[in-house]
Amino acid sequence: MAIEHSIEQTDSNVETGVVAEKFGTTPSTSKFCNTLGYVWDSFGKPTVEERVLCLKLDVFVFGYGILCYIVKTLDTTNISNAYVSGMKEDLALYGNELNLMSTYFTVGYMAGAVPAQIAMNRIRPSIFVPSCQIFWTVFVMIMAKAQSAKLIYGCRFVIGVAEAVLFPSIAWLIGSWYRSEELGKRIVMFELANQIAAMFSGYLQAGVYTSMNGAHGLAGWRWLFIIDGVISIPIAVFAFFALPDFPSNTRALWLTAEQRDLAIRRMLDVGRAQPKPMTVRSFFAMFRNWRLWTYIGPYGIPPIASSSGYFNLFLKASGHYTVQQINIIPTAGNAISIVYGFAFSWISDRTGTRWQWILLSLIPAFVGDIMLAVWTIPFNAKMCAYLLLYASSASQPLALVWGAETFRDSAETRGMAIAFGDMCINAMYAWVPLLAFPTVEAPHYRVGYKLSAALLVAQAASVLFFLYMSKREA
């Protein structure tokens, strides 16, 4: 028996050595990977095959998602940066035009959200998503020629329609390739790419204003739209190769046949269904179920006061800061969102719990809203309150993960829930800022921060109700 055990151990060591030689791993590198795996689970997978698959998914699926969402956010938030960097004065935007620009984008987004998910069920994401990205990028660059607000209104509507495909589609793809214990940090980091983009947009606009204002007869804010477009096109081209569609129908060149089979088995292990062709009957059946309607609260109630645009307007109104500083200072809040979001998602994945961390993430933003609603506080306290608002950014992506796990038996419901939630979010953004945060009242809004605090309370209540409904169904 001892001899047989010795032979088996020798064979095992030889086999391990062959695998290590094949994949470039040694005991020391394995120990290093296990250490890294504690922070990012792709490095700590039990088999080399699964580790390689997850790292490939991180590079292509998750990597493209991050890059594209950064570009999307740049193309969405550049209006606020341009407004405080000369566009207001050049185009004589002294009324509520800034909010209307956001409203036109929001209406377009609402119009495109659900149709985009229906199209995703019929057209491969690897074709549909990058095509939409190229389409909206063209209209971002057209805004550089604007001589009045009217052209920007039209462009913003078209950009909204085209951008509506991105977030639900990439979130759907991520939820179709990663297991539950891998999903939280990736979804949160994917959504927090908008904070990275907001930071980058602030630095970009500050740099453009300093170095390119007046170059070739164009104002710095016009160059911002052009440069955003130049950044976007190569990333869209990369997507035609990077996006693998779904495990059940992928034809990605960077996946081997064995890795495709492993991806399907990984999803079967967690009971996550693959997409099926959507019919008229199945489409309307989703809206007769409790899932979409109760999911609106946890996912679809937006933290409306957390926009850096309101922080920008506060800084501009104070008269203490230069154009560059107005663009850069709010990036501190974006950094808080990234750190806060990753920490909460990492703990959520390690503990396997979601709703508790959603509720906790709402508390700092609620405190910030109350402070700004009171308003008669010192200047530095107001600065602190604006930064606290950014903490709520972890709540929506964690709700997204929670929904993916709750709806794991239906890929179509997963995609539609995200699209429907996004539509509700943008429905609120279409009119709430106009009434609660009118630009002419900036920076002190009579209603805005009170309403934002009330919405956070409503979101917390809806989390508990969704918890009750999901447990009852389970």
Image: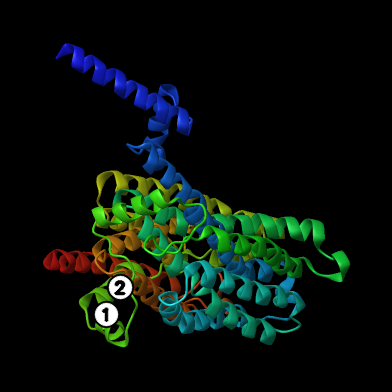
Amino acid identity at mark 1? Met
Amino acid found under the numbered disc labelled 2: Thr
Front position in the image: 335 or 273: 273
Quarter of the image holding residue 38? top left
Q: Quadrant of residue 141?
A: bottom right
Quadrant showing the C terminus: bottom left
Residue at coordinates 21% horizontally, 77% vertically from top-left?
Answer: 290
User: Is residue 92 shown left or right of residue 154?
Assistant: right
The 10 Å Cα crowd at callout 1, few under 14, some 14 to 19, many 20 or more, is some
Location of residue 355 in the rendering, given as x and y in whole percent from the top left corner: 26, 57
Q: Are marks 1 and 2 in contact (CB under 8 Å)?
A: yes
| Up-down relation of residue 253 to residue 7 (above or below) | below
Give the answer, above or below, for where 407 lies relative to 286: above
Q: Which mark is residue 286?
A: 1
Residue that carries the numbered disc 2 in the rendered image:
413
Residue 434 visible somewhere in the drawing = no
Q: On the rendered structure, is 131 left or right of 377?
A: right
User: The N terminus lies in which quarter of the figure?
Assistant: top left
Q: Quadrant of residue 423?
A: bottom left
**Residue 180 or 254: which is nearer the viewer?**
254
Nearest to the observer: residue 168 or residue 212 = 168
SS label for mark 1: helix
Q: How many marks?
A: 2
**Residue 459 at least partly seen:** yes
